[in-house]
Structures are given as structure tokens and as C-alpha cells.
Image (spheres, rainbow, N blue to C red):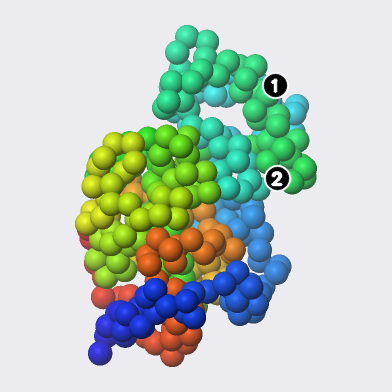
């Protein structure tokens, strides 16, 4: 009996069963604290360090163009930013999408977002200064990262035209637990954040097919703004997505993580990792994680055996 057959057996027993739902306290006490050494939490909290570790292990990550750690370093900001046709601004220690600014071009003397908002040089300097000051990192001094703007796969663009969708893959002891896609909406202002109004779409680990979707905790079948069908959609490059997720788990000394993966035309790329991944993924899948996690201890996964084709769709 394959590992995935075993997993699906666990899922069928766990689905919609209150006792199988993993609570926040259980997540923290049974999985985060015992399996994620505190000294390595910064791999989740510091995007600069995490990208360096992942890139060194061959995990694809967006290229960093510039990093600013002081106000003085912003003195040549106009020339720095003008060197890049498009880019993303983000804080190294930010959470929940705070401080992230996507720029897709320049119109005259202003930089423009995909939604058409204009940001002058003063706006950009103010935004980066806020990041360095720590506005988005609990008041602690931070670094502002200017990085490559990821262009998503045309199929992902079809279901997520308002922003960059990602795949959140939770892994425990190097094995996949649950996956969902977080799909931006108008309400979420183009951000893949469920608390801000993005759609959470549960994904079948076997084939990458969306089996269920939620918006604000309520089931939906279609994108709320475009009407595009979500349930039944298959994420492209799925086997490669899984391989990149497993490579991410092997690259870091953390036993319980969420890997946030985006799908480009060339394949998957890891945006960041999270040592405290949220629990809404259970609602998105209609499945509790408790039974799955309890059953993973001695289970073997076909992904560990290398039965994937590198780069296969």
C-alpha cells in the first residue's frame, strides 16, 4: 500500500471530524516547539537569511536586487530603482503581507503597481524608510529588500488575475501534510493573504487538483471577482512543486514548516518559509491535520523514494 494510499485513508477518517482538527495550542505544543529549535526560527523570520540558505541548497528563489539597512543607503534610491523595469519591495522581517509593494513599471516620474496606483520618488523613499524604521516588524529596525518580481504561470494567471497566487505546503519531518493555494481578490488588494480576503483553495496532494475552496470561511466554487472556476483546476508543474517543497524541508533544520511556493512559466519558486503556518489550510481542504500528523510518524512517502521526474509537470 503506497504512502499516498495510507494518507488518503487518514484523510477519509479525518474529514469533517472535529476531533481531528489541529488546534493552535496543539500545533504549538506538539509540533512547532518540539520540532523547530528556537535558534533556527530566524530562518522563517529573516527573509534574507532564508533565501541564502535555500539558494545554497539548490532551491529556486527570487533574485534579490538591492537590500537597504539604513536611511543613508537610500540616498541613490531613484537611480537604484530605475535600473529595474519591475520589482517587489518587502521587509526582511515582515509578516502577513505588511509592507509588500509590487511595481510593474514606471510612468514618467512615478512607479506604478499592477492595479494602476502611482508612487512618486518621495512615496517610494517614505515606504522604504518605514520598512527600515521597523513599521512592519514590530518596531524593530529592519532591512528593505528590492527583489525580482515573479511572473506567474499563465494557467495560474487565469485563476488569479488580480495578484500572485501561491501554494502553501505544510511539511512535517520532511513529508507533505496538506496543501492549498492562496488566491488574491479585490478584497485582499491583490495579496495572497486569507485574513485580508484571499481565497483558500485546498489541493489534492496526489495530482495538484483543487478540491475545495473557501472565502471568509465559507465554501465557494468560483473566484468571487471573475467567476473563474476554481474547484477542479489543476496546479501546473505539480510534481515539481512537491519536489521543491521537499527539497526546502531538507534544506532547513526545522521539522514543521509551511513552504510558500509560486508557479512561474519555468517552474516553481519558493518565496519564503514559515515556522508558524496558519491552520486555515484545514478549512480549505475540509480536513483536519491532527490525524494526518499522528499517522505520519512511521509512514514512508513515495516522494522520498525519488519517484518524480525533475522539472516534470
Figure check: 271 above or below 246: above
Q: Quadrant of the N terminus?
A: bottom left
Q: Sequence-wise, which precedes: disc 2 or disc 1? A: 1
Figure check: 290 above or below 203: below
The 10 Å Cα crowd at callout 2, few under 14, some 14 to 19, many 20 or more, is many
**Left or right: where does residue 87 sit relative to residue 143?**
left
Q: Quadrant of the C terminus?
A: bottom left
Indicate the quadrant where residue 97 lies: top right
**Left or right: where does residue 66 sit relative to residue 307?**
right
Residue 250: x %, y % from top left: 48, 71
Residue 69: x %, y % from top left: 71, 37
Residue under the image location 63 percent in, 46 percent down = 94
Residue under the image location 66 percent in, 66 percent down = 40
**Left or right: where does residue 276 sit relative to residue 168?**
right
**Left or right: where does residue 96 sit relative to residue 157?**
right
Foreground residue among 185 and 105: 185
Which of pointers 2 and 1 indicates the residue nearer the eye? 2
Label 2's element? loop
Q: CA distance from mark 2 to mark 1?
A: 23 Å
Foreground residue among 121 and 73: 121
Figure check: 221 above or below 148: below
Disc 1 target residue = 75
Disc 2 target residue = 137
Residue 58: x %, y % from top left: 43, 59
Residue under the image location 58 percent in, 15 percent down = 120
Foreground residue among 278 and 47: 278
Indicate the quadrant where residue 50 lies: bottom right
Q: Are marks 2 and 1 in contact (CB under 8 Å)?
A: no
Residue 85: x %, y % from top left: 43, 24
Asked whether residue 9 is in view, the answer is yes
Residue under the image location 75 percent in, 35 percent down = 133
Amino acid at each position: 500500500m503506497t504512502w499516498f494510499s495510507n494518507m488518503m485513508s487518514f484523510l477519509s477518517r479525518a474529514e469533517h471530524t472535529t476531533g481531528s482538527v489541529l488546534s493552535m495550542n496543539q500545533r504549538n505544543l506538539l509540533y512547532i516547539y518540539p520540532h523547530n529549535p528556537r535558534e533556527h526560527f530566524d530562518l522563517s523570520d529573516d527573509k534574507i537569511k532564508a533565501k541564502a540558505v535555500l539558494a545554497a541548497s539548490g532551491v529556486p528563489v527570487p533574485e534579490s536586487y538591492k537590500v537597504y539597512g539604513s536611511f543613508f543607503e537610500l540616498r541613490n534610491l531613484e537611480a537604484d530603482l530605475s535600473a529595474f523595469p519591475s520589482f517587489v519591495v518587502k521587509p526582511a522581517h515582515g509578516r502577513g503581507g505588511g509592507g509588500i509593494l509590487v511595481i510593474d513599471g514606471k510612468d514618467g516620474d512615478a512607479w506604478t503597481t499592477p492595479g494602476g496606483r502611482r508612487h512618486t520618488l518621495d512615496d517610494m523613499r517614505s515606504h522604504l524608510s518605514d520598512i527600515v524604521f521597523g513599521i512592519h516588524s514590530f518596531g524593530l529596525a529592519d532591512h528593505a529588500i528590492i527583489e525580482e518580481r515573479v511572473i506567474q504561470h499563465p494557467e495560474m494567471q487565469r485563476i488569479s488575475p488580480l495578484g500572485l497566487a501561491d501554494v502553501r505546503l505544510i511539511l512535517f519531518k520532511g513529508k507533505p501534510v496538506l496543501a492549498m493555494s492562496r488566491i488574491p481578490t479585490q478584497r485582499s488588494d491583490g495579496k495572497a493573504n486569507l485574513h485580508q480576503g484571499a481565497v483558500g483553495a485546498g489541493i489534492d496532494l496526489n495530482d495538484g487538483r483543487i478540491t475545495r475552496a473557501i472565502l471568509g470561511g465559507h465554501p465557494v466554487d468560483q473566484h468571487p471577482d471573475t467567476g473563474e472556476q476554481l474547484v477542479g483546476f489543476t496546479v501546473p508543474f505539480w510534481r515539481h512543486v512537491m519536489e521543491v517543497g521537499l527539497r526546502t524541508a531538507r534544506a532547513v533544520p526545522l521539522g514543521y514548516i509551511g513552504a510558500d511556493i509560486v508557479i512561474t512559466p519555468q517552474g516553481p519558486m519558493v518565496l519564503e518559509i514559515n515556522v508558524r503556518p496558519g491552520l486555515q489550510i484545514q478549512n480549505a481542504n475540509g480536513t483536519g491535520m491532527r490525524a494526518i500528523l499522528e499517522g505520519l510518524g512511521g509512514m514512508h512517502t513515495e516522494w522520498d523514494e525519488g519517484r518524480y521526474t525533475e522539472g516534470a509537470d
